[in-house]
């Protein structure tokens, strides 16, 4: 799962990509424990591009998206937001959403 800037995420959205974007902080223990789960999911959902955005390096974007809690996971189909969740959820929460893309 690659680190991307907010602008790179926008470019992927404009290309019509299906995206799972995790907004995280390097200092966040929950984020650290969730990232391997999302990495694993990225191998199972080859039709979805999984990326991570560091909120400390992309503060303006995080603010504009009203991200107040990390991790925040946003799933897009192109520019359409399909789901937004905060914190670490059960694996089934993510797979149920990703199965619909």
Image (cartoon, grey):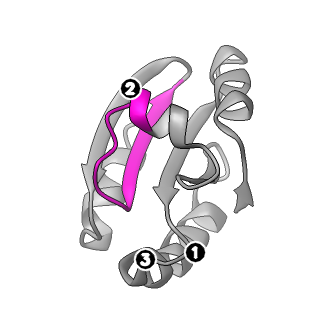
Disc 2 target residue: 81
Relative to residue 28, is residue 9 depicted above or below?
A: above
Disc 1 target residue: 40
Kindly state the secondary structure of the residue where label 3 is placed.
loop
What distance separates the C-alpha of mark 2 from that of mark 3? Answer: 24 Å
What distance separates the C-alpha of mark 1 from that of mark 2? Answer: 22 Å
Q: Where in the figure is residue 90, as x and y percent of width and height?
A: 24, 72
Left or right: where 97 falls relative to 44: left
Left or right: where 96 falls relative to 33: left
- Tell me the magenta residue range: 63-77
Q: Residues within 10 Å of mark 2 (few under 14, many from 20)?
A: few
Q: Is residue 68 found inside the magenta-colored segment of the image?
A: yes
Dividing the image into 4 quarters, which one contains the N terminus? bottom right
Residue shown at 28% from the left, 48% from the top = 68
Compare residues 55 and 92 and report the one nearer the observer: 55
The picture quadrant where one finds residue 86 is bottom left
Circle count? 3
Q: Is residue 45 found inside the magenta-colored segment of the image?
A: no
Q: Where in the figure is residue 22, as x and y percent of width and height?
A: 49, 54
């Amino acid at each position: 799962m690659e680190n991307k800037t907010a602008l790179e995420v926008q470019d992927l959205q404009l290309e019509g990509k299906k995206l799972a974007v995790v907004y995280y902080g390097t200092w966040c223990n929950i984020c650290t424990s969730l990232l391997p789960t999302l990495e694993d999911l990225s191998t199972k959902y080859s039709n979805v591009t999984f990326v991570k955005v560091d909120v400390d390096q992309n503060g303006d974007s995080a603010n504009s998206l009203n991200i107040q809690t990390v991790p925040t996971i946003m799933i897009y189909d192109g520019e359409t937001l399909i789901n937004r969740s905060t914190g670490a959820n059960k694996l089934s929460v993510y797979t149920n959403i990703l199965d619909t893309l």
